[in-house]
Image (spheres, coloured by chain):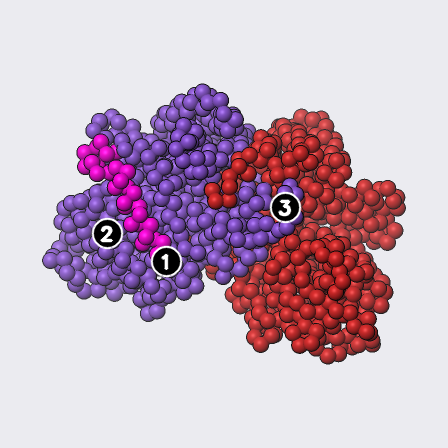
Chain colours: A purple, B red
Amino acid sequence: MTYMAPIKEVLFVMKELAGLECLSTFAGFEDANLDTAQAVLEESAKLCGEVLAPLNVEGDRNPSSWKDGTVTTTPGFKEAFRQFAEGGWQGVQHPIGYEGQGLPKLIATPCVEMLNASNLSFALCPLLTDGAIEALLTAGTETQKQRFVPKLISGEWTGTMNLTEPQAGSDLSTVRSRAEPQVDGSYKLFGTKIFITWGEHDMAKNIVHLVLARTPDAPEGVKGISLFVVPKFHVNDDGSLGERNDVHCVSIEHKLGIKASPTAVLQFGDHGGAIGHLIGEENRGLEYMFIMMNAARFAVGLQGIAVSDRAYQKAVEFAKERVQSRPVDGSANHAVAIIAHPNVRRMLSTMRALTEASRSLAYVAAAHCDHAHRHPDAAMRAEHQAIYEYLVPVVKGWSTELSIDVTSLGVQVHGDMGFIEETGAAQYYRDARILPIYEGTTAIQANDLVSRKTVRDGGKVAKALLAGVAETIEGLCAEPSAAFVPMKKYLTQGHNSLGAVVDFIVTNMKSDPNAVFAGSVPYLKLAGIVFGGWQLARALLVATAKHDEDPFFYRAKIGSAQFYAEHVLPLASALEASITTAKGGESLLALSRDQF
Amino acid sequence: MTYMAPIKEVLFVMKELAGLECLSTFAGFEDANLDTAQAVLEESAKLCGEVLAPLNVEGDRNPSSWKDGTVTTTPGFKEAFRQFAEGGWQGVQHPIGYEGQGLPKLIATPCVEMLNASNLSFALCPLLTDGAIEALLTAGTETQKQRFVPKLISGEWTGTMNLTEPQAGSDLSTVRSRAEPQVDGSYKLFGTKIFITWGEHDMAKNIVHLVLARTPDAPEGVKGISLFVVPKFHVNDDGSLGERNDVHCVSIEHKLGIKASPTAVLQFGDHGGAIGHLIGEENRGLEYMFIMMNAARFAVGLQGIAVSDRAYQKAVEFAKERVQSRPVDGSANHAVAIIAHPNVRRMLSTMRALTEASRSLAYVAAAHCDHAHRHPDAAMRAEHQAIYEYLVPVVKGWSTELSIDVTSLGVQVHGDMGFIEETGAAQYYRDARILPIYEGTTAIQANDLVSRKTVRDGGKVAKALLAGVAETIEGLCAEPSAAFVPMKKYLTQGHNSLGAVVDFIVTNMKSDPNAVFAGSVPYLKLAGIVFGGWQLARALLVATAKHDEDPFFYRAKIGSAQFYAEHVLPLASALEASITTAKGGESLLALSRDQF
């Protein structure tokens, strides 16, 4: 089966929940209306459905392979990347001044989702290139921008992020790679970087590595890290390619999933030093890297939504085709397609409701990002930026954790067939497993949410979002239909639980940090469940009001919201209990390490 | 890392929760005391830790392979199976009269757990052989028993269960394989069976296939299925092997996990007919198969517990070795082993508490099975049998669903390294994925729990178990220690939720079967959470009373119970809500199939 981009669903979210039309009032976004969005999405859907989706299985069966320092990608990937590049898809959200299309993040977001749904391994290459572009635009000189960004946007070159080293996983304070200044202003880099996604491949003429390293007199810890651009091939002043640089791929990993995407070990400077150039100021590398990481984290959240939707589509197709067992209510005396069985519906509805909720929240976050950049009022920009920054770890952490459950249900719907690799459902389950790990594990997202996004402002942004939830609850209360009953009840409970947890975190952070951090991941999940449920509640209101315009579509939206209210939102109270009951983190921390 | 059998933990459960000493008062179980158990477990631990556990990774990297109808197992498996057979491990729970050891199921249970923890693929072969032995003992003639059972117990031969056909997954009513009676009283079998675990291999001299098929005049549906024994090689009257039978392995599957275990497609009768013999009476095959399926389902539940424990052990080892980041509470200004970080502790504690709870429940169920067979009082035997039968789908469904979460957390604890196949954590995640599927999916377990185990007796057994929970809660209430506070609160809530759900199911089954079956899996999980929590509450009482005898051990037990009360039991209310709020199953069933 190929992949059907959910265009109608996505346009609904963009218009009704994320306020696309409002964006077109901002300077520079005049064309960002629904028609533009629809045209872009339809083109994207073609490339994704026709070219990239069919290559997804191929990438799993014939992973990219390494030999003598070079990586050969899965057959078909090179040509597909050429089509991706020629279509201008790398540039959707990047500035027109550097050959991008300058569209809002809200329009780029469904393109990224579709790309990842069709082929997670393939989509990682543009995802990392986006990060490199962001970093260069943020901190590069104009010369650096002009030298690298248009070529990255055109797809002639691709980009990477080089953070991790063998001794330093998530903890960048221990980065050891060295950068030695040269008389010409360049640097020579030495060191080993691991887990470099698309760190070496054959799809583009050059690879632009952005690398964290230390200059000789840099302070210890995270305050002594600088960011360098180290291209695989040197770039001459006229933009043409020069000599091969001293950065080499010494191996790629043998992974559980996303096998077509080469995960490289890169060796810098084994033959005299890899020539790099400083980006921005010395010792501010982590700060710049956080900018690209925020973009990348948001995009990884979209990966979770994407693989969930793909797994859902596959499971639905199977459930409609597979005939087995009579209906439990005795309504037929012959075997029926399994989609008729209540438990299969429960699984499919769970997959669907979680995907819709996490998608809606991510798209709303994207719109906040657009407001943060383009709103005419500076105070409003700051407010939206704060909301966006709060939501990034939630989108990343929650959507990716969900994707594990959703792809697992996808396997389960297939029964025995799901365990057979040829069926294809298992690939999503394997591919998804990296998502809560890379670009910062769920725990790292949760710690960010607790520290920088909740405690630092005393819970202000969280409470502002909760006020929005309360407003929606008021709207629900004005509706008499039975479909609203569970949403009123459980969104209210969720709102109260999340409020209580935010208070708990802000109050106890100083006196009992272990208890707070023991509950950080449950807090992140709780925030996702409540704010995701909020979006479905808003969708429920719209779908009810517009029901008669398109009953087939809106009835399904009402069903999803109701299902989510009944089956997902009740978890909020349980999460609150697990965070606040465990005050003191006693059951966690009382044991010695030897008692584990 | 190899596998360390949790002998102390297992003995605690057997003695304090499952009442091993009581079993030794039953005729035939005189030797089934703690000393015997300990001696058996220590021997089992040696074989599992030294021989089978090291072969587990090997089986994943070099799966069993098929060529021209024969299957070559992973290097080392054949010799390991010889050691397993010579140790008498196939016979632990089987009758002395057929060369078994005649020990209680409660002592066999940890042996099965250890075998599976060390090597899930390997352990499936004895698991299926156990099923074949059970079926033969139940329904075979004395001649059939004498012919097959001692050879199966000695490990000279192995057994299989042949149910599934290409058109019939879980729905056995559509079985099409034919059995034509011959003048000599034998039958000729024709048909294709798929997903036959260890259906062909090179570890034993013969394979005893138990096969479901239809005789020519059999009624349609499940009432026309008979059970046949069809050995790979004919067996002469003196027990020696004769000609090759007409059953052939035409392929094996390419699977997500348990790769060393060959999953065969078997073709019966393509060269004139596979000679088989009827087991028991014609048309009662499904009944006999259910006997072996109940044993197999319980054992698959143990597989879930086993792979969870193995994943936990691996994650703990990594968390103690991996040094990264400073403590969040500022207690050190250098990076520490990640086991010090609250979120890593939360993950490890979750893995541990779920494993302990599901293990405790399974072992208690095993003891009920022993009572059902050996209690001197017939009424008591019937009572214990009913409890055991209620618990089998819970043990199977809940323990295996948990194993997905636990092995997924195991990957997460390893971070990036978890996604690299060489690390080994990913294998458990892949292997575990089959467990909620085979021997009846979780939905099938849940439907069994709802229909045959709850509605049929009007909730009587469920309520009897809940009365036991209430009694334990009374015991908790007499304890003043703070460690009891969350358990009192959330076990009480769980007790009430489960009681309400049982009432809901019994009340609504007739009028609204779709709503009931839509909640069947949540009901199964709820039962697991509450009855598993009950066992940890009992453990908490014992550990508190005996604390000073062995503070290191009992403090850890108290910690597990407290963690479970705070982090797992609160889910009970959410499950109740998702079952009972969705009355009418409206959000599930209102949509047409095209709306999915």
Q: Using a 10 Å C-alpha cutoff, classify the residue at mark 2 as few (fewer than 14 neighbours), some (14 to 19) or many (20 or more).
A: some
Query: From mark 2 to mark 1, how far is it between C-alphas?
Result: 21 Å
Horizontal arrangement in the rendering, residue A80 relative to residue A139 (left or right): right
Q: Nearer the viewer, residue B426 or A173?
A: B426
Residue mark closest to the camera, 2 vs 3: 3
Q: Chain of mark 3?
A: A
Q: Is residue A586 above or below residue A596?
A: above
Q: Tell me residue B523's x, y (percent).
A: 63, 38
Hey, what amino acid is under mark 1? Ser
Tag 1 residue = A261
Query: From mark 2 to mark 3, how far is it between C-alphas?
Result: 53 Å
The reply to the same-chain question for discs 2 and 3 is: yes
Tag 2 residue = A88
Circle 1: element type:
loop
> Residue A380 lies in what quarter of the image?
top left
Q: Using a 10 Å C-alpha cutoff, classify the residue at mark 1 as few (fewer than 14 neighbours), some (14 to 19) or many (20 or more).
A: many
Q: Nearer the viewer, residue A114 or A133?
A: A114
Taking the view exactly as shown, the residue that stands out farthest to the bottom is B243
| Residue range corresponding to the magenta coloring | A23-50
Circle 2: element type:
loop
Horizontal arrangement in the rendering, residue B539 relative to residue B20 (left or right): left
Whether residue A537 appears in magenta in the rendering, the answer is no
Q: Chain of mark 1?
A: A
The reply to the same-chain question for discs 1 and 3 is: yes
Whether residue A31 appears in magenta in the rendering, the answer is yes
Q: Tell me residue B466's x, y (percent).
A: 72, 34
Which of pointers 2 and 3 lies earlier in the amino acid sequence? 2
